[in-house]
Amino acid sequence: ATGLEVWDTGPGIPEADRARVLERFVRLDASRTTPGSGLGLSLVAAVAKLHGASLTLGDNTPGLRVVLTFEEAAGAEG
């Protein structure tokens, strides 16, 4: 498997909201004062799924850690 990790030191996303923020047009109350439409993480999730990757959201303390894990295709050579 091949992975990609991205993290920041912002406010993070509470564990209880992590599955919900992967849906289209979802914005948490804390982000209502910043511009955006709530599509960013839903697009990441859709593209990850299209490529057979798993997407995991976790704590960076402070911040958010996003991990994409790409499984090798059957018959692929590394």
Image (cartoon, helix red, strand yellow):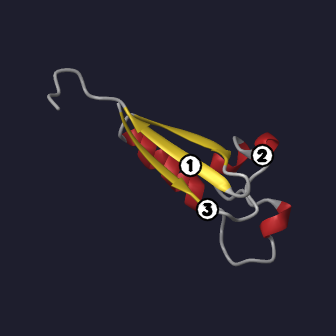
Marks 2 and 1: which is nearer the front? 1
In the picture, the quarter occupied by the N terminus is top left
Nearest the eye: 24 or 34: 34
Query: In the image, which disc is placed on residue 8?
Result: 3
Where residue 16 sits: x, y (%)? 81, 41
Nearest the eye: 19 or 15: 15
Where residue 5 sits: x, y (%)? 48, 49
Tell me which residue sits at (61%, 62%) in the image: 8
73 left or right of 28 in image: left
Say whether marks 3 and 2 touch (CB < 8 Å).
no
Residue type pointed to by label 3: Asp
Q: Which residue is mark 2?
A: 17
2 left or right of 32 in image: left
**Can residue 23 be seen at all in this image of the molecule?**
no
Tell me which residue sits at (66%, 54%) in the image: 64
What is the distance, in whole Å, between disc 2 and disc 1 at their CAs?
A: 14 Å
Tell me which residue sits at (78%, 46%) in the image: 17
Q: Earlier in the sequence, mark 3 or mark 2?
A: 3
Q: Which residue is mark 1?
A: 66
